[in-house]
């Protein structure tokens, strides 16, 4: 096998300009896969939500099955934010989350083990005896027993809910029927743009 070696005497090699090198010591870059159960939740909304925890890099990829049909999953490139209080030194987005009434989950390489019931790190749902309120996000009670004011899942405001948040548009609103309505047809099956 041939070994390619970089020769510093040749400057401006055109064939090397097309490549982007990601150093191995920068382990804070990840490719994150999100599955929202509601496909109408916009990419802009998901980006805004993720931006509370990580830096979302440009570009998104819609994952398709073998027949070219969109599976409802999207991949985002992210850069983890530093958090010296965590075990590995990074802030991680929640594995299970809600944006308004819509639930979703995310996975990526190096993600800490998290409970799908309470969202805590270090145990599975089978071993969990906690409950987390989907309205206020606190442990110890469920949504129907919540006495706390409801909060927007996107900007954390008590003034409105996620469906009314003006930061990003939570749902696609491109219709002929008026403002706030959802599209009449589902997204195209083979569209990856």
Image (spheres, rainbow, N blue to C red):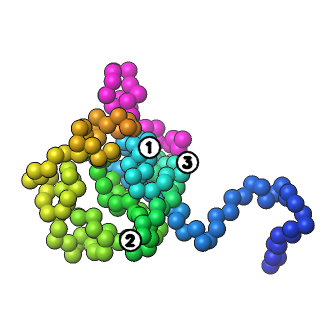
Q: Secondary structure at mark 3?
A: strand
Q: Which residue position is annotated with label 3?
A: 58
Q: Residues within 10 Å of mark 2 (few under 14, many from 20)?
A: few
Residue 43 - label: 1
Judging depth in this view, the residue of 90 and 172 nearest the camera is 90
Q: Quadrant of residue 121?
A: bottom left
**Residue 123 within the segment the image draws in magenta:** no
Q: Position of residue 38 (x, y in %)?
A: 33, 45
Answer with left or right where residue 145 lies relative to residue 27: left
* Residue found at the far bottom of this picture: 1
Residue at x 38%, y 37% (from the top left corner): 167
Answer with left or right where residue 6 lies relative to residue 19: right
Count how many numbered circles sit on residues in the image. Answer: 3
* Stretch of the chain drawn in magenta: 172-193
- Quadrant in which the C terminus appears: top right
Mark nearer the N terminus (1 vs 2): 1
Vertically, is 40 above or below 182? below
Q: Secondary structure at mark 2?
A: loop
- From mark 3 to mark 1, how far is it between C-alphas? 11 Å
**Chief SS of the magenta region:** loop
Q: Which residue position is annotated with label 2?
A: 86
Q: Position of residue 145 (x, y in %)?
A: 9, 53
Judging depth in this view, the residue of 166 and 107 nearest the camera is 166
- From mark 3 to mark 2, how far is it between C-alphas? 26 Å
């Amino acid at each position: 096998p041939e070994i390619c070696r970089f020769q510093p005497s040749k400057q401006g090699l055109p064939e090397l300009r097309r490549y982007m090198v990601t150093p191995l010591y920068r382990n804070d870059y990840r490719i994150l896969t999100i599955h929202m159960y509601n496909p109408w939740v916009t990419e802009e909304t998901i980006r805004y939500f993720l931006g509370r925890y990580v830096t979302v890099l440009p570009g998104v990829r819609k994952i398709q099955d073998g027949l070219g049909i969109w599976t409802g999953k999207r991949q985002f490139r992210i850069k983890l934010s530093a958090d010296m209080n965590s075990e590995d030194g990074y802030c991680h987005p929640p594995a299970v989350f809600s944006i308004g009434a819509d639930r979703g989950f995310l996975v990526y390489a190096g993600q800490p083990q998290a409970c799908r019931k309470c969202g805590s790190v270090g145990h599975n749902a089978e071993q969990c005896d906690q409950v987390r309120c989907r309205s206020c996000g606190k442990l110890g009670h469920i949504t129907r027993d919540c006495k706390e004011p409801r909060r927007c899942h996107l900007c954390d405001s008590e003034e409105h809910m996620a469906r009314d948040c003006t930061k990003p548009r939570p749902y696609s609103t491109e219709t002929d029927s008026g403002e706030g309505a959802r599209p009449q047809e589902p997204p195209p099956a083979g569209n990856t743009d």
